[in-house]
Image (cartoon, rainbow, N blue to C red):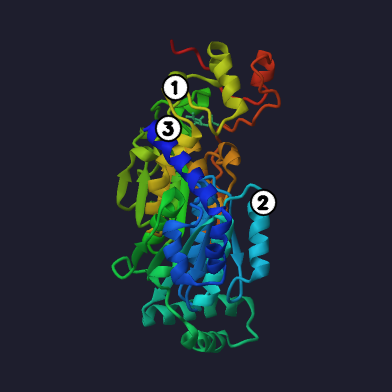
Amino acid sequence: MLRQLMSYVKNCSRKRKYVEDDDEKGKREDLSNGNILNGNMAANNFVKPCQLKAPLVVTIVGLPFRGKSLAAHKISRNLFWKGEKVKVFEVEESANEETLKSISEWFGNSNNVAIIDGMHLTKQSRTLVGNYCRKNVYHHLIVEFECEPDCVEENINDTAEFYQKIDNNQDWLQTFREKNAKYKSSFEKCLPQEGALINVTNSENVLVHSVRARGVQGLLQTIILGVLSSPVIKHRVFYFSRHGESEFNVLGRIGGDADLSPRGKKYSENLAKQLGGPGSSPNAPKPRLIWTSELQRTIHTVQNIPGPRTALKDLNEINAGICEGLTYEEIQERFPQEFAWRDADKLKYRYPHGESYLDLLQRVDGVVQALLLNTEVLVVSHQAVLRCILAYFKGSKPEEIPYVNVPLHTLLIVKSHGYDFKIETVPLKVECVDTYRMQPSNCSIMRTTQEALTTVPQHFDAPLIN
Ligand code: F6P
C-alpha cells in the first residue's frame, strides 16, 4: 500500500515536471483562454495533477431563491466543524478578478477551502474560476442548484418574510419576484466538460430532494456530496440538556453509569415542566423526538417528558478508559503524566483504552446529520458529547471544543436563524455541582500536584473505589 502510494507521488511529480517544459506552454495558454473542451481533454493528459491536499474552490451556481446560500453555509459549517479552514466568499452575481485575488490571499494563509456563493449563471463566469484553479493547481468543484417551481415560490415567500421583519419599508415579495424573473434567460446549465460537478435538485421534501454527481474525488468533495445529499430544513429548533446531576457528579467522579442524585431527580421534574410533561403550561413545546444516551442518568432525566424516545450509543459520554470512575484528583495521583498530556492537548488526547474529543467528533457526526433532518428534537446527553454537538451549531474552533461550557441543570434551545443558529440558555434553577474544569496554566508533566489540581471544581469527598 505504502509502495503504491509512493509510486503515485513520484508519478505525480514526474508529470508536474513534464508540463513545465516549454513546448507545453501553448497548451496551458489554450486553457487560460477559456477553451473549456480542450481544457478538459488536456486535463486528462497535460494539466498539472492536483496534489491530494491542494486547496479546493467550490463554485456555487444557480438562479436566485434556489437555496444556494443556505447550502453553501451548511457545507462551510460542516467542514469547519471537521477542522478544515473554510470561508464563504459572497459575490453578487459571479466571482471576478477581485474575488480570485481574495481567495489567493486566503489560501496563502494556510487555509484550504473557498466557497464562492454567487449565481455564476454563464459558462464564461465559471470558466474564469475554472482556469484560475487550473493555473494554480487547485481542486475545483461546481455545485449547481435547481428547484421545482413550487419550491422557488416557497423560497421567495420565506425570504420576503425574513426581510420584511428587518425592514418593513419595502415590498420584498415584489422585489424578489422581479429578481427571480430577471435572470432566468441568462442561465446556461453546467456542462460535463466544465469539471467536477454536483447537481442538486433542492427541496425540503426528502423524496423530491436529489443529487447527481460527476467527477467528485477526494475526501473533502465526498464530504460535500454527503452534506448536500440531504435537504436543508429552514426552520428548526432543537433542545439540548445534560442529564440531571448524578451520584458520580456529586463525588467528582467521571464516567460510569451512576443514577441521578436527589437534585438530579428534581431537575428531571423541572425539565419535564418545560417540555410538555406534568405541570407544564398548555403552550409548552413538546419534543417530537427524544434522544438519550444508553446510560441510566440520561434515560431517567427524560422519564416524565412525553414523546417517542430512543437511547443511542453514540450519545454515551466520552469513554475515559483506565480513568473511568476516578476523580480528577485520583487521575493526577495515579496517572500524573496522562493528566498533564490531556491538559496540554485535550482535543487530541485519547485516554488509554478510551476516547479523545477527536474520536467523539467522529462518533457524533451521524447524530448531527440525523438532527439536521428533523426539528423539535430533545437530546439529553453528557458534558463532552454535548460539547462536540453544540460546537457544530456554535461554529466553535476545534481547539475550543473541549472547553465549551455546558452546565448541568440548564436547557439549551437552538433555533435556526437564516443560515446561522441562535442558542438560548435556560437555567432551571435546581442547585447542582459544577463539573467544568478550566485548562490550568501549567500543563507540563513537571508541574506539582497543586498546580495540576488548581482548576478542579469542588465536589463532595469521594472515597477511592479500588
Ligand atoms: O464530569 C462529568 C463528565 O461527564 C465525565 O463523565 C466526563 O469524563 C467529563 O465530564 C468530560 O469532561 P472533561 O472532558 O472536561 O473531563
Which residue is more in the foreground, 124 or 165? 124
Instruction: Check the picture and name the quadrant holding the N terminus.
Output: top left
Q: Are marks 2 and 3 in contact (CB under 8 Å)?
A: no
Within 10 Å of the Cα at label 2, are there few (<14), some (14-19), or many (20+) other Cα atoms?
Answer: few
Name the residue: 61% across, 68% down.
90
Q: Label 2, on which residue?
A: 108
Mark 3, residue position: 260
Q: Extreme front residue here?
A: 23
Residue 35 x %, y %: 50, 72
How far apart are the two marked residues, 1 and 2, measured between alpha carbons? 44 Å
Closer to the chain start, of discs 3 and 1, is: 3
Q: CA distance from mark 2 to mark 3?
A: 52 Å
- In the rendered view, would you say 394 is above or below 6? below
Label 3 or label 1, whichever lies nearer to me, is 1
Indicate the amino acid at tag 3: Leu
Residue matched to label 1: 324
**Could you say whether the residue bearing mark 1 is in a helix, strand or loop?**
loop
Using the image, determine if residue 438 lies above or below residue 276: above
Residue 235 in view of the camera: no
Distance from disc 3 to disc 1, alpha carbons, whole Å, reads 18 Å
Q: Quadrant of residue 28?
A: bottom right
Q: Position of residue 122 (x, y in %)?
A: 51, 78
Q: Position of residue 120 (x, y in %)?
A: 53, 74
Q: Give the structural element (helix, strand or loop) at label 3.
A: loop
